[in-house]
Amino acid sequence: MEPRRSEMAAENKKFFVDIMLEEVLEGNCVGGKFTHQQWVQMTEKLNTTCPRKYQYNIKQVESKYKRLKTNWTRFYNVKNNAMGLGWDSVRGVIYSDEDAWKNWTDRNDQDRDLKKKSCLHYEELTTIFFGSTATGRYARASTQRGDVYASMGGHKESGVRQRHSYTLASLKKEQPDQKEQKEALLLLDAMELPDHVYKADLKTLRDAMANHMFLNVANDQKRHLLLEVWVEEDSRNR
């Protein structure tokens, strides 16, 4: 059955993003892309989740993925390279004063239209596109920035340690990656984790992209899930 419309309704787009995110967080995205079987399964799941008046085929779902990635890539570039711009994570829009925006668009004319566009679900999409393009364990330059989401069920163990706190006051003058690393350590430090989990995730958080992902996770439940994925990868790579 052909969909009622070629463009996804907003609520269906959210369903689609959540379905892809689940695949990535479960470690099912292998070799840098979704497999044909995954597209089949994700399309079936999307059609089951969406109202019956909206039904999509694999070609349309893959096409939507490409459009989402193209739009996200543009926002990611501006968000991580432009100076003096703000980000509204709720509406998925860039905000700035006219001078800051002019300074960027004078050198990047192709981005002028982004002031009137949005990138909803930016944090989730960042995890999807970074997670689905990795080959090997976090195969990116250590200076490359991205967002990641965490995972792990918060069960306690007898080896849970008391960890010292870090102060945010010293973060102000540091470079972005250093700042993110300390902020990520603050979050990790506040979580009750078994020793082996804490140690494995400390090692992972040396990676700038991992830090950025960890900081932008939607909530503690997903952050626990991400930690679990990292621990599993650490075990496989030993």
Image (cartoon, grey):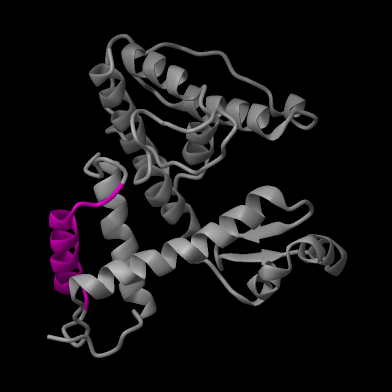
On screen, residue 46 versus residue 137, left or right, reads left
* Image x and y of residue 187, in percent: 51, 30
Which residue is at a point 68% across and 35% down the rendered structure image? 176
Magenta span of residues:
33-50
* Image x and y of residue 134, in percent: 37, 38
Up-down: is 51 above or below 16?
Answer: below
The reply to whether the magenta stretch includes residue 85 is no
* Image x and y of residue 30, in percent: 24, 41
**Between 104 and 226, which is closer to the camera in this rendering?**
104
* Residue 38, quarter of the rendered image: bottom left
* Image x and y of residue 151, in percent: 33, 36
Which residue is at a point 13% across and 60% down the rendered structure image? 41
**Between 94 and 143, which is closer to the camera in this rendering?**
143
Residue furthest right in the image: 99
On screen, residue 133 versus residue 75, left or right, reads left
Up-down: is 207 above or below 55?
Answer: above
